Image (cartoon, rainbow, N blue to C red):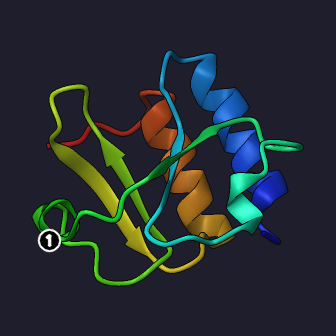
Amino acid sequence: MRQLPDWNDIARKAKSKNVVVLGLATDDEQPWSDANGRDFDILKMNDAALLRAYRIKITPTVMLVSEHGRTQWVRVGALSETSTQELFSIINGETVIQ
């Protein structure tokens, strides 16, 4: 929850580039279920096969997934300032994903 302001900022900037930010809850964590103060939706993702398909073993795992379901960028653990800037660079089209 301490990174909620950062994620709200990411969600707002991403929306301006037609990129959707979704939070994924892999369990019944209550703090994320409250929409107050959150600028993005949370999807419950507790399907073990889907977690394996995207290789999600621990949370938080941050992924940038294309509209075709292809994983384009992944960071495991809380976002650092450097990884946040890298994510913004990709969202803004400044970094090309191969």
Crowding around mark 1 (Cα neighbors within 10 Å: few <14, some 14 to 19, many 20+) is: few
- For the C terminus, the image quarter is top left
- For the N terminus, the image quarter is bottom right
Which quadrant would residue 32 be assigned to in this image? bottom right
In the image: residue 38, left or right of residue 48? right
Residue farthest to the right?
A: 37
In the image: residue 93, left or right of residue 78? left
Q: Position of residue 2 (x, y in %)?
A: 82, 71
Residue wearing tag 1? 52
Q: How many marks?
A: 1
Residue nearer the viewer, 81 or 2 = 2
Q: Position of residue 79 (x, y in %)?
A: 60, 69
User: Residue sitting at 78 percent across and 58 percent down?
Assistant: 4
Q: Position of residue 20 (x, y in %)?
A: 49, 28
Which quadrant would residue 44 be assigned to in this image? bottom left
Q: Position of residue 89 (x, y in %)?
A: 50, 41
In the image: residue 1, left or right of residue 16? right
Residue nearer the viewer, 94 or 51 = 51
Q: Is residue 28 above or below residue 25?
A: below
Residue nearer the viewer, 4 or 82 = 4
User: Residue sitting at 14 percent across and 71 percent down?
Assistant: 52
Q: Amino acid at mark 1?
A: Arg
Q: Is residue 17 above or below residue 31?
A: above
User: Residue sitting at 78 percent across and 42 percent down?
Assistant: 35
In the image: residue 65, left or right of residue 69? right
Which quadrant would residue 57 be assigned to in this image? bottom left
Q: SS for tag 1?
A: helix
User: Residue sitting at 67 percent across and 42 percent down?
Assistant: 10
